[in-house]
Image (spheres, rainbow, N blue to C red):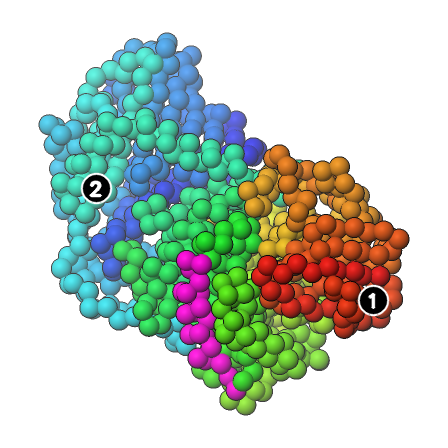
Amino acid sequence: MKHTVNRGIIYAETGIPETPRWFSDSRLTFQMDENSVTQVDYRNPLQTRGSHTIFLQRLWDGFRYYLERNKVIYKLQHNQTKIWPFGIEAQCDFEGSLLKHQIFAVEESIVIQLITPAELPAGLKFDFEFYENFGLIPVDSQDLRYSGGGADRNWQEWEFNKANNLLHGVLEDRYKEHVDEHKKLNINNQDIDHNDDQAPIALHIGISANFPLQFVKRPINTKFILVSDEFLLPSTAYSFVITFASTKAELQERISGLTANVEQLVAKQFNRYQAVIDRAPVLVSPYEELNNFISLAPLYHESCKVTDTPGAIKAKTANYWVWGWDGMTSNYASLYWGDQAFIQEMLQFYEDTADAEFGIGHSFRHDMGLNSISALPSQSMYISLLHQYYMISGDLQEVKERYAFAKRIFKLIKTNEVQGTGFCDGASLFPDFPLFMHETGNDISGLNNTIFYCAARSMEYLAELTGDKETKLSAKTTFANIEKNFLPLFYDEQKNFIVSSIDSKTLERRNSFNSNAVKWENGYCSELLDPISTPSLKFFEENVVCKAGLREIPVWSDAYDKDANQLHCWWPVTGEYYMRLINSQNRPDLIEQWIGWVSYWTKKLTIPEGIPCYIDTDEPELDRWNTSKGMWHGYSMRGWYQAAIHGVVGVGMEAGGLTFYPYAGEEMTLQGLHFRNKILDIEMKGSGPYIEKIEIGGQSLLATNKLPVDLVDGENPVTISVYRVHECLYPVTIQEAYGLDLLNYRYEDGIIRASIQGAGTSRLKLIVSQKPSIRINGVSVEVHYDSAEETATVELEMSLGQVAELEIQ
């Protein structure tokens, strides 16, 4: 079924494309196909065990709605369909009259609306039906989606109250001794034992309407029918509502509020998503599906937010609840599409919910209590996230308010440092089966410690911002030790890649390789791994790249497919390192292949958690968990989004402003990127791995890939044009200066001059034809020159408020 996408809204002439689809609002999620609502999930805040699936279509239909006239039922066709992350708008031609019908997730409730035209055939009624057995009794121990989850469920008889215009149902989850049918040995995330109240937990379900109802119950194959008590009138909006509450009194209050204010509540939901559309960037490129992905991701990410708990976000639109590192990682994306306020809330959420002794939560219960504690290295993502928030927002006050907690996390991780190496002890936080990766509980993980390295770099910067000299020194010592030890201990010269882990007792490498052994959390990561970039890409090409994507585990590894699931997949959230490699090494062929992978799933209107690479195919199959149709996974969306911005468009942001990453790619424009209260329109012109000039505000900047931050000024939008070429035109070019501000930049007669400022350790990386002379405040500084790579690097130690004068020739 053909569809189009415009600014994140999906359009179809007829039908609902790529069904079944999932729609979400906070604690409520429902699935729908062309005919009915097939599943309803609700995260009861009082529920600590049991299944969150309330209704499930099996033999008999789920929620259906129709037109009815003289006992004859008419199906409402879907024409001119518009699909949002929270529901569907459609039209139906009935005997020459155009009716509008729509179904939405609003206020953690399902709203089904029929809007009649001015000219309406007589004698019509609005009908809603479902079978009693749509209510799920979860008992399937072989399917984790529908198992009991430590509770037995009982449904009470449904009752219709004519006076209240309400069909009322109640289920009770009664706890039993919990047996986890899918228990695995856990050596990376610490579980928390709870002494839960064993009293049954009730969930009240109410179905009502903003118009009087008749109720009919079929006695065999029990089916409930709610139909309008009177004939439909022209130019009127009729709404069924389905909602949930912990008590009957609360349910009645919710029903009353919904039916009385349904139009305002629906309008509020539209306004919420329209605000996301209005601020989201737009990609104009030759790649239609990549353009679509860039417009879709911010909206589907919005649908994952838990609205009653600011800063909390579901890991996926369905199946998953709130997690720790799943929420924190890869949030450049959120900042790029203008959701700084949510990241500010997220920083507070993870601090407010942290365990007083052990730190940030790994998995959360429905009441936002903790099920488990995050492995220590993954907690360091909080430090990188706070730094990222400051980079894009410039909000120093938020840094000061959150700094004490970030420092606490850093010190907590440091308690697990191994033998003065800078490394943090602990099993890999991912995959879920570290034992198959030869880990024993005495482990130094590559994944964990690339995350921690990025955080230590951020910690030094944050400590300088807040004037904490002791922590600044501790952070610098930590990352310096990691830099000294990482490649000598992790890099395997035969395989041309780092091993997944080393033994924390003997420091010996394990014969285990994992493409996720590097987790790129910020741009500092390149300073750790640049020396092995060329062999690392060779390893990816020969052992990881396949038709479906990037295998996590090479097929020759004894860990490959060991769990018959996770260990044969690609996890998009971990793919930033690969994108950085193929961009920096000017591989447009591999970038085009990556765009094809993203395009394949965008066409299916699904962004998976994990992509199966078990079958050698460029059309991987949908399944019932990792690649479920219609589901959008949060960190996959963000991971792909920022990889596309950084590697396909070729622009990155950090505290020192913007850096461009040219390659021999197609021309394209990114409109509406957010940075420091500015809206940026970025044009990538020409093609090639070098930059001829950057144009902004009537100025042309030569010999730099980094944009001076003081030029990002003026009225929104600020237009920036980057001209890429195939040959380097200058004897010296600034390639990167992560964390360093360039001010008052000039290039004349082969000499670069600029004022610079920053916080902590910054490394200025240059493209050069010979060893350059570099002066800071007129004094020559030491330069590391690599004649083979034609690069030069100088390390600078910057203090907050210090402005230095840079000269390069």
Mark positioned earlier in the residue sequence (1 or 2): 2
Q: Magenta span has 416?
A: yes
Residue 92 picture quarter = top left
Q: Is residue 317 visible?
A: no
x and y percent of residue 80 in the render? 49, 25
Residue at the image point whose x is 41% and y is 54% from the top: 346
In this rendering, would 532 be left or right of 76? right
Q: Nearer the viewer, residue 538 or 758?
A: 758
- Residue 205 disc label: 2
Q: Is residue 805 visible?
A: yes
Residue 32 picture quarter = top left
Q: Which amino acid lies under the numbered mark 2 shown in the image of this protein?
A: Ile
In the picture shown, does residue 273 fall above or below 538? above
Q: How many marks?
A: 2
Residue corresponding to mark 1: 773
Residue at the image point whose x is 39% and y is 19% from the top: 99
Marks 1/2: CA–CA distance? 74 Å
- Residue 151 disc label: none
Pointers 1 and 2 in contact (C-beta within 8 Å)? no
Disc 1 packing (10 Å; few <14; some 14–19; many ≥20): few
- Read off the magenta span: 400-419
